[in-house]
Amino acid sequence: MQAVMNSFRETLANARHVLILTGSGVSAESGIPTFRGPGGFWRKYQATSLATPEAFAANPSLVWEFYEYRRALVKKVHPNEAHRAIAEFQERLAKKNRRVTIVTQNIDELHQVAGAKNVLELHGSLFRTRCTKCKIKETNHGIPICPALAGDISAEPNFVSSNIPLDELPRCSVQSCKGLLRPDIVWFGEGLDSDILDKTSEAVETCDACLIVGTSSIVYPAAMFAPQVAQRGVPVAEFNLETTPATREFQYHFEGPCTVTIPDALADPAAAASEED
Ligand code: BJW
Ligand code: ZN
């Protein structure tokens, strides 16, 4: 295992542009549940079933309760060793005129809190809203986002929706609009932001090493980026607790918690050498 890790580190040492793709597994050890598997439920609902435009149209109160619960949770947790190692790696390479592009499926902003720059958020952010009427996007870190969503929101399986009236849910700050706000998040069946997709494609086409961290690689289009890099003959390393449907397409697979494997892979070779002196 260590010989394989050394081989991947050698690849990184020679790379000019590294692409790092992350999924919910990178935040799992910070205390944010992943989507699939035992933690993927909120109340009696599969989390992914609430992340749809249909769920929001049917019950906007329930979907806002789900997102407010997660906004409050994320505000209580901290980036972990994997987030920090990724941010430090990006900063270290930038000083040498080398580039690290971070593309995440996560909506928790923990990469940015750890210090990462220019993070491409494929699926949006918990801390942005979009007006359903005038479409304006706004940053919003307020907890609660509106008075009706104040207090501890229960995740208990038998808890029923508070059925907050529409006019008490988050509303647009533009006086002449006052439309219903929704989280600025890409739900199933919705298209991804074209500017973010263009920037991601550019990184997929030009990187000379790639890491894919903590994702089940089953949600498209995110699931196709690392295989596309591998198809160009570029080394790709997967970091996960288990194998995924994409594992066999990659040159490297490092199994284990990413708070251990990522700091190991991205450690500064110069610091390691000076420790040996
Ligand atoms: C650890 C760890 C540790 C844990 N260390 N590892 C082509 C083919 C088939 C279907 C489609 C297709 N193109 C589009 C679709 C439809 C759909 C889709 O992909 N469906 C699949 C389920 C099949 N895609 C879309 O609808 C996308 N839109 C789109 O493509 O528009 C055009 C279009 C539409 C329809 C048809 C065709 C074209 C939009 C996708 C939006 C995804 N949104 C969500 C919700 C975001 C908001 C929210 O959070 O509420 O994004 S769904 C959810 O899944 C979330 C995640 O970002 C995403 C990925 O999940 P992730 O991060 O991989 O989490 P998990 O739980 O699956 O995996 C965690 C992994 O971590 C596991 O492997 C663990 O082992 C590992 N792990 N702890 C290391 N400590
Ligand atoms: Zn508006």
Image: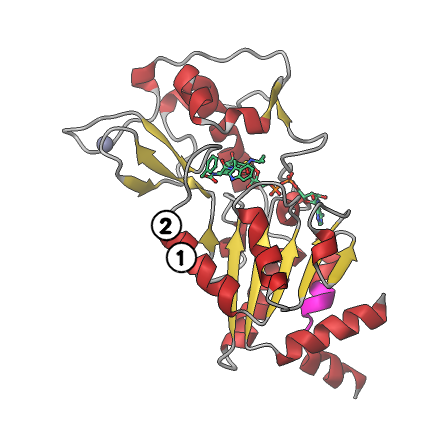
94 on left or right of 176: right
Q: Is residue 264 magenta?
A: yes
Image-based side of 207 in relation to 31, left or right: left
Please say if 200 is above or below 272: above
Q: Residue at x 54, y 43 (%)?
A: 220
- The relative height of residue 217 versus residue 20 in the rendered view (above or below) is above
Please provide percent x and percent y for residue 37: 71, 32
Q: Residues within 10 Å of mark 2 (few under 14, many from 20)?
A: few
- On whether ligand 1 comes within 8 Å of the CB at mark 1, the answer is no
What amino acid is at disc 1? Asp
Question: Looking at the rendered structure, which numbered label has been put on residue 221?
Answer: none
Pointers 2 and 1 in contact (C-beta within 8 Å): yes
Mark drawn on residue 198: 1
Q: Could you say where residue 83 lies in the image, as x and y percent from the top left?
A: 60, 56
Q: Is residue 55 left or right of residue 81?
A: left
Q: Amino acid at mark 2?
A: Ser
Any part of residue 202 in sight: yes
Helix, strand or loop at label 1? It is helix
Residue 171 position, x and y percent, is 29, 27
Task: Point out the stretch of residues depicted in magenta.
Answer: 263-268
Task: For label 1, count other residues whose C-alpha is less than 10 Å away and answer few (under 14), some (14-19) or many (20+).
Answer: few
Residue linked to disc 2: 194
Q: State the image quarter where residue 154 is shown.
A: top right
Of all residues shown, which one is farthest toward the bottom?
277
